[in-house]
Amino acid sequence: MSSHSMSDTFAERAAQLREYIFSQPSSTFENNPWAVANAIDDFAETQGRMMIFKKKKLEVAQAQLTAQQPAPRTILEFGTFVGKSAVAWGAILRDIYGGDIPEDVNVYTFELDPVMVSLSRDLIKLAGLQDVVHVLEGPASESLKKLHSEGNVTSVDMAFFDHWEEFYLPDLQLIEDLKLFRVGSLAIADNTDFPGAPDYLKYVKAGGRGVAGSVKYESLSFATKSQQGKPSVVEVSTVVALA
């Protein structure tokens, strides 16, 4: 499939998802992020396959975030797509903070496709998370550099990678270079087994750069099962030292 036809397919699915959710009574979803996230899952399962962060994988990440101490305040997401996981991060933060999310708790999610940006922003607003979850259009690395230079992101508690696998490692290393991680920060990556991110996986499994002044990781692979029964892996790397 060419990149053009793939883009057309994504846009068509996005339009179908928009119709699926916004044709239902708004009261079903308003200020209810889990209802929005679950509806996206339901659409993906019943109306056609979509490359979203599925429930079983999300449960892995949710357990890690819920156990994190101190509680997460800044989450970065590389690859918004239709906004399912972005909405879920907001829902998890709402659960952690008991529904009253502090003003300095934010999710920043990066997306290139303007169609996906528009849809995800609308879904985030429907879920009542527009003050917490922010969709930035454009290359993730440039968006992050701008957030950092403007003082909006000074520390990162969790970075989630679910965009083009070839950029997982460069974007992780950008976070390192900006000195945004703390001990206990999480780097969570999807699709490290398929399509695969071998350079990223080798790096985090080795503990990082392994030089003075670098971040050191402990990394675990969590296997889930897809609907087809095939193993599907989420890689969870925890910052254990800042050398």
Image: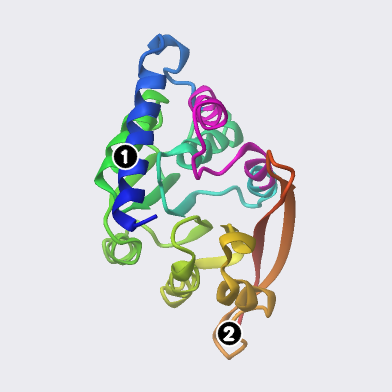
- Residue 52 in picture, x, y percent from top left: 51, 43
**Magenta stretch contains residue 49:** yes
Q: Residue at x 62, y 42 (%)?
A: 58
Q: What amino acid is at disc 2?
A: Arg
Protein image colouring: rainbow
Q: Is residue 172 above or below residue 132?
A: below
Q: Nearer the viewer, residue 9 or 170?
A: 9
Q: Which residues are magenta?
A: 34-60
State the image quarter where residue 116 is shown.
top left
Residue 186 visible somewhere in the drawing: no
**Magenta stretch contains residue 202:** no
Q: Is residue 195 above or below residue 179?
A: above
How many angstroms separate mark 2 from mark 1 (CA)?
38 Å
Q: Residue at x 65, y 64 (%)?
A: 237
Q: Quadrant of the C terminus?
A: bottom right
Q: Quadrant of the N terminus?
A: bottom left
State the image quarter where residue 210 is shown.
bottom right
- Residue 26 in picture, x, y percent from top left: 38, 12
- First in sequence, mark 2 or 1: give its number: 1
Residue lying farthest to the front in this orientation: 1
Q: Which mark is residue 209?
A: 2
Q: What residue would you read off at disc 1?
A: 11
- Residue 193 in picture, x, y percent from top left: 64, 62
- Residue 11 in picture, x, y percent from top left: 31, 39
Q: Is residue 5 above or below residue 148?
A: above
Q: What amino acid is at disc 1?
A: Ala
